[in-house]
Structures are given as C-alpha cells and as structure tokens.
Image (cartoon, rainbow, N blue to C red):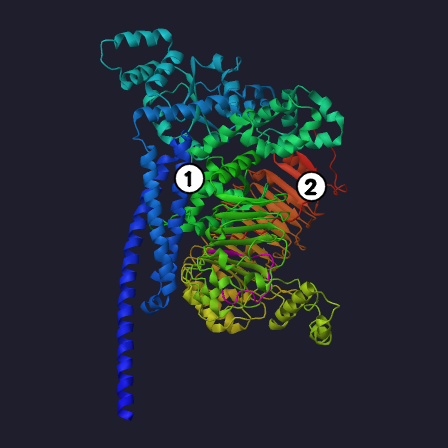
Amino acid sequence: MAETVVSMARALVGIAVSKAASAAADEASLLLGVQKEIWYIKDELKTIQAFLRAAEVEKNKDELLKVWAEQVQDLSYDIEDCLDEFKIHVKSQSLSGQLLKLGDRHRIAVRIRNLKSRVEEVSNRNTRYSLIKTTSSSSADERDSYMEDIRNQSANNIDESELVGFATPKMELLKLIDISCDDGPTKVICVVGMGGLGKTTLARKTYESKEDIPSYFSCCAWVTVSQSFDRKEILKDMIRQLLGADSLDKLLKELQGKLLVEVQHLADCLVYGLKDKRYFVVLDDLWSIDAWNWINDIAFPKINNRGSRILVTTRDAGLAERCTSEPLIYHLEPLQIDDAVHLLLRKTSKGQKVMETGENMKNIVTKLVKRCGCLPLAILTVGGILATKKIAEWGKFYEELPSELESNTNLEAMRRIVILSYNHLPSHLKPCFLYLSIFPEDFVIQRKRLVDLWIAEGFVKARDVVNIEDVGNSYFNELINRSMIQPSAVNIEGVVKKCRVHDIMRDIMVSVSREQNFVLLIKDNVTSVEEETIRHVAFHGNQFSEICLDWSSVRSVSVFGDRPMEPVPSFCSPQLRMLRVLDLEDVKFRLTQKDVKNIGLLHHMKYLNIAGGSYDFALLRSIGKLKCLQTLDMREANISALTTAIVELRSLRSLRCSKRLDYGYFNLIDNPKGCLTITMCFPMIFTTLVGFSDRANLIAEIQMACSTRWSDTKGVRLPRGIKSLKKLQILEVVDMKGTSREVIEELGELSQLRKLSVTSKGASENKYKIFCAAIEKLSSLQSLYVDAEGSSDVGTLEWLDSICSPPPLIRNLKLNGSLLDLPKWFGNLKQLVKMHLSRSRLKEGKTMEVLGTLPNLMLLRLYRNAYVGEKLVFRREAFPNLKEIDIYFLKQLREMRFEEGTAPQMGSIEIYGCRLKSGIVGTKHLPRLKTIAVQDGGDVANFDLLRAEVVAHPNHPLLQVSKDRGHNDLGGIEGSNVAAEATESLPDDEVDGS
C-alpha cells in the first residue's frame, strides 16, 4: 500500500513538473514575443519623433495636420510609457522574477497590441487625408513667407514707442558705437533683448538721428534680415543703399548677358565699393549664426580701417557674443514704470486724468503695465484696446487679459511675436520651455530645481562624456540667451542661478501648453476639468471642484499652495502609476501618513521633492522600492536618520536632507529636561483636549526629538551601505556625530560627488580623522560645507588641518566653526572661487597673506568673528581676481586698507554691523569699484574722506548707507554719488557648487 502511495505521488510530481516546464516554455515564448513587439514599437517611436520634429513648422499653417500631429504626439507618449513599464516590470527582473510577474507581462503584451493597432490607424488616417506632403522649395518659401508676415505685423506696432523712454538707451548706444572715432577696424555692436522690447525702434532712432550718423559716415544702410531672406535681394538692396541706385543699375546691365546673376558677382561689387568708405550698416532682426557668418564673410571688406560700424539687433544673447565682444553688446531693458505708464496713457488718449480718478485706478494702470512687462509692443497693443473701453472697464480687462490673448484679434500681433520666438526654438527646447508653465505667475524659479525636473521628465538627453546636469544647464542657458526666460539672480561668476518668466510670455506659454494638452493648470475658481489625457498637472490653489482626468497617464504633479480637494487622488495613489515627478516643495500644508503610504508603488518616480517641513519623519519607509529615483529633496524635515532602504536607490544623483530644528510645541533644545515634561504630558495628548491634526504633529516631534537625543544641528544620520550610491553627486546634510565611523569612511567611495554638506559638532576625534581621509579621495568634489555650530555654542574645526591634499576641483568652501589659524592646505585651493568663513577667529598676518595668493578667488565673506584682527589689509598684487568682499559683524575690526596694485577686479565692498574706527582707506586703488555698502548700523570713521575718494574715483562708485546713519557727516558735496537706503537683510549664502 505504501509503495502504491509513493508511486502515485511520484507520478503526480512528474505531471506537475511537466506542466511547470510546459508553462515555463510558454512563458518564455510569450516573453520572446513581447520582446519582438518592444523592438517594433521602439522603431515606431523613433519614426514618430522624427516626424514630429519635421512637422513643427508645417503644422502652424495646416489645421488638419496640426490635429493629426497632436494625435501622433499623444501616441508617442503612450509608447514611451509602455517602454518604461516593460523596463521596470520585465526587463529589469531576474528570470525567476519574470516568471512570477505574469500579470504585468500579460498587461504589457495587451498594451503593445493596442499600440500597434493605434499606429496602423494613425497611418491610415494620413493616407485618407494626405496629411504628409513632400517638402518642396515652394513649401519652404511659404514657410519663410509665413514667418516674415509675423515679423512685419509685429514691427508695425512699435513705431510709437519712439515717443517714450528711449532717450537714455539711445545715448548709451551711441556711446558704444563711438561715431566720432573715424579710424580703426570695423566694429560690430549688438542690441539684445526679447521680442517686443523695442530693439528695432532703438536702432532706427539711432540710425535716423540727423545730427549723428549721416554726418559721420559716407554711406548707410538698413537691412532687415529676419529668419528668411533672399541672398541676392539683400545684396542688391545693400548696393542700392550703400553705393547708390546707379551703381546697381550699371552692375545689372553688365550682368545682363549672363544666364544667372550670381551672388558672388553682387558681393564682389559691394566689397570693392566699400573698401575705402566709412559705412554704417544696421542688420535688423538677426536669428542665426549662419546668417551672420554669410553676410559678414561675403558682404563686407576684410580690411577697412576707416572706423566703419555694423549694428546688429537680435533676440539671442549667445548669437550676439559670437558676433562681437561683451563690451560692445547693449542689453536693452524694459521701460521704467513711469515711462511705461506714460506710454500706456498716451496710447489710450486718456492722459493723466485717468490717474486722478482714484487710488484704485492708479493700481490698475500700474498692474497693467507690469502685466505687459513694461514692453513697448505689449503696452501699445493693450493701450490701443483700452482706448475703445470705458475707464471703469479697465480693471475687468486686466483680469481677463490671459484669456483675451487667445481670442482677441487686436492682441494677435503681440501673441505672434511670442509664438515666433517659441516656433524658432529647436525641438529639444520646446518641451523645456512649455514645462515652465507649471510655476505660478511671478514665481522665482531656481535653476537647479528646474534642470532636475527636466532630467526627470526625460527632456534632457545625455551626451557622450558630458554630465547630464551640464547638458540640462546648457538648455537653461540657451533659453536665457534667447530671451525666453529672464535672469533673476546671478552669482559672482556670472552664472544665472534663478529666473522668472515674463508675464506676457507666460500667459501665451500657458495657452500653447493647454492647446497641446501638455500641462494642465488647476487654479482657484476653476469649477470643473473635463476628462482629458494630460501628462503634467499643477495645482495653484484649492478653490475648485470636479476634476475628471485619466490619472494613469499623468507623469508629474506639482502643488503650489493649499491641499487639492477631492476627487484628486492621494499623491501616492496607485492611479498615478506612471508618475515620474512629485514636487511638493511649495505646499502650505502638512502631509500625512495616508498621503505617502503607497509611495513604493510608484516605480517610475525619478524626482521627489518634499522639502520645507511638510511631512513627518517616518513617511518614507517604502522609499527603497523607487529604483528609478534620481532626486530626493527632504530639507527642513522632521527626520533624524535616513532609512537603510535609501541604499537601494542606485540611480540617485541628488540627496538633500536636513533636520528641522523648530520643534514648535516643545522647546527641547533649550531645556533637555523637557523629556520629563513630555513623560508627564504624554497621556494628555490622547485626550479630547488635543485635536487629531495637532496630536499627529506632537507625536512626530516627540519621536524625532527623543530619537536624536535633542540634537541641535541640522544633520541627519546616514545608514551603512551609502557607498553603493555610485551616481550620487549632491549629499547634504550629514550628521557626523550620529553617523557611524564605517559610514563616514564610505563617503570617500562616492567618486562622482560634487557637493557635500556636513555638521560636525560633537563628533569624536577619530571620526574627524576618518572624515578628512574620506575628503581627500573625493576627486570630483567642487563644493564643501562643514558646520560646527549648534544652538548654544560653536564647535571647533581645527581638526581640518589634518587634511593633507584637498580635492583639486574645490570651487566653493563654506566653514562655520573655530579655526584660529588657516589650515595648511588652504594655499593649495587653486580652483577656489567662493569662500565663506564664519566664527573662525582667524588672526592678522597669515590669513590675508594666504588668501591673497588664491588665483581664482572671486568672493570672500567673513561672518561673525571669522576674523579677529584689527586691520584687514589688502596687500599689493594680492587677490588678483577678487570681485567682492563682504564683512559681517567683525567686532574687533577697526580698519580696511587697500594698497596700490591690490584686487584689480574688486567691484563691491559690503560692510554690515562693523565699527571701523580707523575707516576705509585706499579705495582709489580699486579701478573697477562699483559699490560700497555700509549697512545694519555699521560705522565708518573719516566718512568725509571716504566720500571724497568716491567722488574723485574715475569709476564713480555708488556709496550706500543706511537711513539711520544721521550721525555721520553726509553734508552735500556737489556731484557726490551717495545713496541713503533702508537697511537690507543679509544676502543668501552661496554654497551651491553645481
């Protein structure tokens, strides 16, 4: 009997094994089939993307093609999503994992079949309607004509801006042109600015200035280049204007017998005729470097020492830099508010009486010109419309202006001038530009945040041997150069760190983005949103109701303001399975455990930003499942340590985390005995005396405070295994005291690390030595911040002297703690650009001697007793590249002295809260000095002498003082350049080394 049972069991096992083998074979076959289908749709995606690039211009003229292109674009998004799903759920799995994920594979296989059907249908639709036509020269001519029409329409609307606000720019431009210099090589001067700013108007005012240009130049020409131009016709026009109509007629007669009038014949005639003339030529609306190279090479003599001038207007600052040198580029700025208001009122024919109707109308007019960005074209266009409306209707028109831009034909020229710039963008920059519409109006956008978002969205493509962040930064700079976005903050090296989007530009950008179903903005007072396929969603408020979207297609969610109301899904809902970006940095509410409990399901997540203390310390336990995550930002959070799961995030490039020190409910830091108080009060937390929301916050803060033993630094403990994050480039802020010695040693293996920030207070001597050894290994490190400060006192940084050889690429160094003497390795910081020292207690002598030898140091900040000497002396030939020196609350300092030949690049001196009883001596030795600021109650002795130096300085620097400096003798010296200003807040720390 037993043998029979065993035999039956063996037979059953054999059948099961056979079936399992058969199933495995079937699954392997299915997997191979899926793989073939993946290859097919990959090829289709490449073809689709090529078509979309080719159709970008044509679709602007053909409504049917435009609709079809939108359908093709949507199909390409779905194919990308499918490929991502395959990569996550199948390709990245082991063979056993693939066999276990049958449901995912089946779902992907079905999705691929549906995509194939859609590809075939899209193709059939093209056949039915003949949407794609062979590009011919005639179609190219039509495209050029279309773009030329836009240019002509916009240019005709700016003539009246000559009347207001151009006197000073004209004077400054004539100074650059230097018309009185009648010898030397030909100079190229560029006027740069965004569309509608009045570049053409300024150039024409200068060109037509009767008392200037005609009397200094023997011949002049105005040439409109634009995006399209006929080479022969331009050369003919230049000959006609520069050499005379008779010269052109004579040349054409000579060439009459030839079958074709060659471009070279015309160019030779022009160059020969100009070689001994002093000419002035305006090249208006230059768009490409190819156009400049052609005109410059073929139309102008190579040698002409008569002081000739070429004036170029362009929207592209990068193009201007390739045409000429920086000193000969004039960046045209928007009108001043008063000029803008004056121009608007003049265009409306209402005059100043409008401003006399009440304070509210003054506000409306001011808001209107600000909405127009003080652009002459926009002001003239809006003013023309307001002229037809009653004054009482102006406020309503202001509120409706964004929607009016889409439908009001009177605003078409203004819309087209922005669309012209957008259409001219290369294909890789268009989604980057449209993506800016997720940010609220007037929002200051940080470059790093924006570039990280672009990378996460897949807009930035890596190049060989070029870091992908550097590629993203080049995209950002290109948009700046093309005047599509405006710089808001520029660092000491001239790198734009923050930007804004011009209001009119943003309004039209939002319109285009909505038209293309690219970004959905959900704002206050939106009553409903119909069901659509949207990829990017941004919430700008909370006063809205029904939102019916296909959330499974959404790739990014950004929230600015209050919590979105139902029926929006939870931020980590399974409905958002394709989510790549979750940006909650600017929310005004606290996240709950419920909000993020499913975060591990969002397998495609690449960017997660919950900075600003909006969440509790235990929210991210399942974060280790986000294998694609590249950026994690948890600054100012209720966390004390990173979970061990963080080491599973092998794609992580930026990890920013810091502890929030404001406990809110318990002042535990000042009173460590507060633990007893907590013990006594803890039962009360669970009574009806404390609300549910407050209870959750209290418990989170108590847990965090106890787990950190009331640590008073911002650092966070790191787990073991951090060395596995080989792609990590930014890591902040590490708590050295709480982090183990083994983990600190692991930091030295992060070979790609560019930026590191740590807190060191309370750490052991052994940990200091291990950290110094790790720092020496970080060959890619560019920015280092070491903070030894706590809430009650400041620790020492003297242990930094044990570093033998610092990372060779360090450009930014910030130290907060006692040094007493400069570490020996400071003299080796040959690449250092910015140094920020606080509470270092450095002495006279060696400090300035060593720092003065650093060849690339541009910014030096000394905060709160960083320097305890009485004199700060800048010796001869020291600080060759220093541009700015900032001193803040140096109690011992009595005198600043600049010797002859020191700091030749120095442009700014800022003094906050210092009592310089012996004054500032030798500013006359600083040839590039622009500003001296004495703020926050600072005192400077011998102020009259300092002011006299300022008045006599050839660079005419601005001397800024606080309004409360009445005790200083500021009696008038005629022509002095002294400004009394309100005390400003201390500037933000510059520690971003990216």
Q: Nearer the viewer, mark 2 or mark 1?
A: 1
Label for residue 203? Answer: none
Q: Position of residue 575 (x, y in %)?
A: 49, 57
Q: Are marks 2 and 1 in contact (CB under 8 Å)?
A: no
Residue 951 x/y as whole percent:
64, 33
Amino acid type, label 2:
Val
* Coordinates of residue 297 in the picture (x, y in percent): 33, 25
* Front-lying residue, 696 or 925: 696
Left or right of 268 on screen, residue 695: right
Q: Is residue 481 above or below residue 459?
A: above
Q: Is residue 609 magenta?
A: yes
- Determine the image quadrant of residue 679: bottom right
Image quadrant in which you'd find residue 67: top left
Of marks 2 and 1, which one's residue comes earlier in the chain?
A: 1
Residue 748 located within the stretch drawn in magenta: no
Label 2 secondary element = strand
Q: Which element type, helix, strand or loop, lies under badge 1?
A: helix
Q: CA distance from mark 2 to mark 1?
A: 58 Å
- Tag 2 residue: 961
Residue 817 higher or lower than 119, as above or below: below
Q: Circle 1 sits on which residue?
A: 70
For the stretch drawn in magenta, the main secondary structure is: loop
Rate crowding at label 1 as few (under 14), some (14 to 19) or many (20 or more) other CA atoms within 10 Å: some
Residue 752 visible in the displayed image = yes
The amino acid pointed to by label 1 is Glu
Q: Residue furthest bottom?
A: 1
What span is colored magenta in the figure? 606-622
Q: Quadrant of the N terminus?
A: bottom left
Q: Nearer the viewer, residue 552 or 282?
A: 552
Residue 530, compared with residue 764, is above or below; it is above
Residue 579: percent from left, percent from top? 47, 54
The picture quadrant where one finds residue 890 is: bottom right
